Image: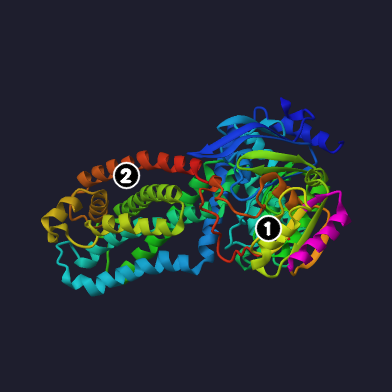
Amino acid sequence: MTAAAPAAAAGTGLAPSGPSLLTRAHWALTDTLTITRRNLLVWMRVPAYIMFTVIQPVMFVLLFRYVFGGAIPVTTPGGYVNFLLPGIIGQTAAFATFGTAIALAQELQKGVIDRLKSMPMARSAVLAGRLVADTARMFVTIVIVIGVGYAVGFRFQNGAGLAVAMVVLATVFGLAICCIAAYTGLAIGDEESVQAFGLVWLFPLTFLSSAFVPISTMPGWLQAFANNQPVTFVIDTMRAMALGHAPIEANLLKSIAWLAGIFIVFAPLAVRAYKRAG
Amino acid sequence: MTAASPGPAILVEGLTKSFGEVRALRGIDLSVPRGTVLGVLGPNGAGKTTAVRILTTLLRPDGGRALVEGYDVVRQAAAVRRSIGLSGQSAAIQEELTGRENLEIVGRLYHLPWPQARSRAAELLQQFDLTDAADRPAKNFSGGMQRRLDLAASLVGAPKVLFLDEPTTGLDPRSRLGMWDIIRSLVAGGTTTLLTTQYLDEADELADEIVVIDHGLVIAAGTAEELKGRVGGDVLEFTVPDRNRLADAADAIARIGEGEPHVDKETGVINVGVGGRGSEALIEAVRGLDSAGVLIQGLALRRPSLDDVFLALTGHAAEEDEQDAPGRRGRRRPGGRGRKDTAKAAS
């Protein structure tokens, strides 16, 4: 067995202590970027994904701006289109996480995650790369929605700095929902069920909020829910940042508390589901 | 450490794993010398996939221990991962990406610098006869090509030990033969290989040693020839076209064979081990069947196949599905789109 000897010797060089902490940190970063790149490539290759992430929010803007909007009385400066845009952006960020859950469930089902886990890559990279790619995708969608918003009459009223802050808040909000979605995708692990389950919690959460209509127009029992759920806090904050018609601080603090809570609960759950998956 | 020791490439002792009530592995021992191929043979649900998942660090065993290249799969999982390649039952490639992109990304995840990742991908595409299709999305590949790409991906890191979990399940017979050629050439290159299969001819064809697993236990081990020796001599086999006469035919030859004749109600095939009595048994069988008035086809005496071995060892044929492999939580089995179980029976 002459061939086996040098191979075995090479094995000893690498293995007992393993690579240094610094090397491992470097790998965690490059692996995450590799997975991010792969996920974005996949996204760009599938017309249906682009359709779902770009066309759908644009349709929502047009639908509410021109079809439902006339029937919804608001007091925000600039009328319903200004009320609507922060809401649509929040909803867009939340719905973009469907892709996260579905992609992870698919990868689990197909054995891609098994394959990746059997490789000497950083174990954190699959989830991290997924979140980075989906956040990037979400950001692109948000920018497109703002562009379309401008075309149909939306205007930021409160300066560029707070406009940027609004986009940042929307992205962080989307990332938090992404963690929930990643957890559901990995824990359920079946594409169709994940999709159905996504509708069950994302629809009520986004529509029973201040995203599309003033909560005061809802029946009292519904107001109780809508007034106290995180999507409302986040969207009210975004709206105040965009329009300057209301104070930001109270809602911002509630938003941060909720988002931090979501990260603290669901990020570890997602990591655990990933470790157990397969 | 133990890694440099000339011990076996894979060593498994008393490995156990349960999923709730289901005892998937009930104490398995394996030893695979470097540079050899171990065929792990067993029906669905026997525990093959569970064993592979433990050896590739995807699952923690409940008890026992497993070493790959001298590294413990639980305590030294990272070192194990640097030594192995895994190609599973379903092609774990990203269908939207091209064959080349798939391999380059895997190369990057093995921490090859970009130029090396590129050249390694090109080299493997060449080796697996995928160069022409390299820049097409993998979803346009045939089943056989996807499986080849998947196998290529498992080799990017030049593993010392390769795990092939049912590498030809679902492939048509032609692609299967192509896959066998590829696996043979890999093995000739000295890669230690653990191959699971439900196809007895596949183990016979590719493996140096075979272990037969059933219900989470190793029930037999040895070379293909040794296992065939377990049946003890020749097998008499014939087909009864009239299914209603199967029982009569079995009765007619019951006294000739050693042990009960095996009757396959679906195909009408009856076979029975006849030991060393060869042609004598053949004549008796013809007389017996003639006097019973049963019409038969293709009466023949043959050397035992691994099918016969499996039958003799377990009392049921290898391709008779029991339950789903619990290691997969029954999720992956129904198969992705376009996967057909054409290569069903073991010839």
Q: Is residue A64 above or below residue B275?
A: below
Q: Please, what is the three-letter code of the amino acid marked with disc 1?
A: Val
**Do the residues indicated by labels 1 and 2 lie within the same chain of the protein?**
no
User: Where does the magenta region start and end?
Assistant: B273-294
Q: Is residue B69 above or below residue A44?
A: above
Callout 2: SS: helix
Please indicate, yes or no, whether residue B129 appears anywhere in the rendered image: no
Chain containing mark 2: A
The image position of residue A108, as x and y in percent, is 52, 51
Q: What residue is rendered at 54% in x and 65% in y?
A: A45
The image position of residue B209, as x and y in percent, is 78, 42
Between residue B66 and residue B267, name the one nearer to us: B267
Q: Please, what is the three-letter code of the amino acid marked with disc 2?
A: Leu
Disc 1 target residue? B263
The quadrant in which residue B140 appears is bottom right
Q: Main secondary structure of the magenta part?
A: helix
Disc 2 target residue? A259
Name the residue at the front extreme: B291
Between residue B67 and residue B130, name the one nearer to us: B67
Chain containing mark 1: B
The image position of residue B138, as x and y in percent, is 63, 64
